[in-house]
Amino acid sequence: MRWRELLEQLWKTQRSLLILIGVLLVSNLLLVTLLDQWLVPKVTEQESRFLQRQTEVRQMMRNQSSAAITPEQLYLLASQDIAKFQQAVPDYQEFTGLIEELLILSSRAHLNITQINYTSEELKQSPLLKFSLSFNVAGDYEQVKKFIHSLEQSVRLITIKQISLQSSDNNGVNLRLNLETFFRPGSRES
């Protein structure tokens, strides 16, 4: 009985608000039905058509690119890429610049490199020298992460060949890096 009286009183005092809520509820149900019955299927159909056309365009581009490029053009493009790479490779005289850069990058990360081991070899099928460098640094994880990030951002052609990370005593880590880079022989002194 109590609920009925409350509802009657609410109807008498807040009739316009209850009617507004009812209209909004009916409108909401109509919009959900409209979306579910009409709009969602249209969007799904359009999306499906878009994906199909995108696949067709990609296939056409693959067919055109493979048919349009002749072996001579491929050779020319490869020759240009090799020339760009060789221009990016510094002379052997820049080896000390590489070592200096490694020391600067480690210093910026508040790490200390005490010794860098390296080996070099002449490549048989290229007029380049390949240098392999290895060294250790110790610090906290953030310092090591900053150092590796700065190595990756370097303008030099440096490849991180191997990386090993071990925990150390005072909540730090020991990092062992093996890097690889290339130089043109230039005026190398044997």
Image (cartoon, helix red, strand yellow):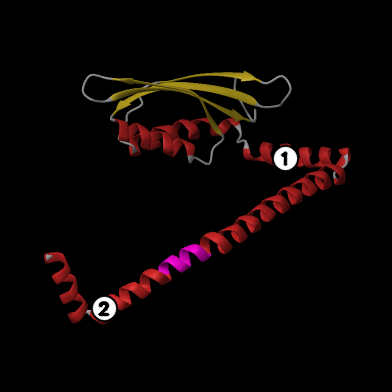
Indicate the position of residue 119 as horizontal and vertical percent values. 54, 17
Foreground pick, 23 / 95: 23
Q: Tell me the residue that label 1 is attached to.
A: 81
Q: Label 1 sits on what residue type?
A: Asp
120 relative to 42, above or below: above
Region rendered in magenta? 28-34
Q: Is residue 104 visible to us here?
A: no
**Most frequent secondary structure within the magenta stretch:** helix
Indicate the position of residue 16 as horizontal and vertical percent values. 27, 82
Indicate the position of residue 94 as horizontal and vertical percent values. 54, 34
12 relative to 127, above or below: below
Foreground pick, 72 / 95: 72
Marks 2/1: CA distance?
A: 73 Å
- Nearer to us of marks 2 and 1 is 2
Asked whether the residues under the numbered discs 2 and 1 touch, taking CB atoms below 8 Å apart as contact, a structural biologist would say no
Q: Tell me the residue that label 2 is attached to.
A: 17
Tell me: 136 left or right of 171: right
* Magenta-colored stretch includes residue 32: yes
* Helix, strand or loop under label 1: helix
Q: Residue at x 72, y 36 (%)?
A: 82
Foreground pick, 180 / 49: 49
Of pointers 2 and 1, the one earlier in the residue sequence: 2
The label number, if any, that marks residue 113 in the structure image: none
